Amino acid sequence: MQLPSDVKRVLLSVEAIDVRVQELADQINTDYAGKDLILVGVLKGSFIFLADLARKITVPHRVDFIALSSYNNGSVSSGEVRMIMDVRSPLMGHHVLLVEDIVDTGHTLDYLFRVFAMRYPTSLKTCVLLNKPSRRVVDISATLDYVGFTIPNVFVVGYGLDFADTWRTLPYIAELKESCYS
Ligand code: PRP
């Protein structure tokens, strides 16, 4: 397979991602049977993961989005999370599952938990495709419910994840060459 010149290696293949997303969906289908579920995708990074996950979730559910930003187009989290767009649905009385592409420092999930908990959902859980614990600044371990893969401290792009808003639509998850961002 010909890789883009900025890509060092494929970390997670299309096939590996597909298998794991199905496993996550299977678990969610079991856990949310008979419950009123709202999936909330965190834009932009989660858009491909959410699209694939939602189509594998067979229990009735709605899909909503929230847009946040904390990286200001760079590779270092500012730690200051900004809400760009809120969900449309009231969350009170619903089972809410936050869908994220990656948890890195933990600032974003920590912020979302504090904001969403104040809206009195019946339950609030998270489904994160990638967990990078080596970069954690805020301890959000208690809020990680469904995790796709735990990855090392490398800069990953593809399957929704970007560097300076590029590479999001690579079908696999790749490690970017250090020369691109250092
Ligand atoms: C990325 C990613 C997560 C967040 C995780 O979003 O999509 O939302 O960073 O990082 P943290 O755990 O250090 O908070 P980003 O701000 O880059 O925006 P994007 O999703 O639009 O790419």
Image (tube, helix red, strand yellow):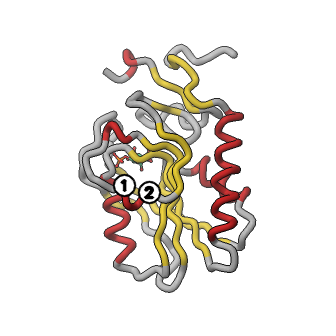
| Relative side of 4 to 2, left or right | left
**How packed is label 2: few (under 14 Cα within 10 Å), some, or many (20 or more)?**
some
Q: Quadrant of residue 34?
A: bottom right
Query: Does label 2 point to a residue whose CB lies under 8 Å from ligand 1?
Result: no
When the figure is inspected, residue 83 is found, relative to residue 100, above or below; the finding is: below
Mark carried by residue 141: 1
The amino acid sitting under disc 2 is Leu
When the figure is inspected, residue 182 is found, relative to residue 170, above or below; the finding is: above
Q: Residue 52: percent from the left, percent from the top?
A: 68, 51
Which residue is at 54% across, 14% downward?
A: 5
What residue is shown with label 2? 144
Which residue is at 29% across, 53% downward?
A: 139
Which residue is at 50% across, 32% downward?
A: 157
| Relative side of 30 to 119, left or right | right
The amino acid sitting under disc 1 is Ser
- Per the model, the C-alpha gap separating discs 1 and 2 is 6 Å
Q: Residue 50: percent from the left, percent from the top?
A: 60, 54
| Relative side of 135 to 174, left or right | left
Q: Residue 99: percent from the left, percent from the top?
A: 52, 57
Seen from the viewer's position, the closer of residues 16 and 2 is 16
Seen from the viewer's position, the closer of residues 55 and 31 is 31
- What kind of element bears circle 1? helix
Q: Quadrant of residue 18?
A: top right
> Do tag 1 and tag 2 residues touch (Cβ < 8 Å)?
yes
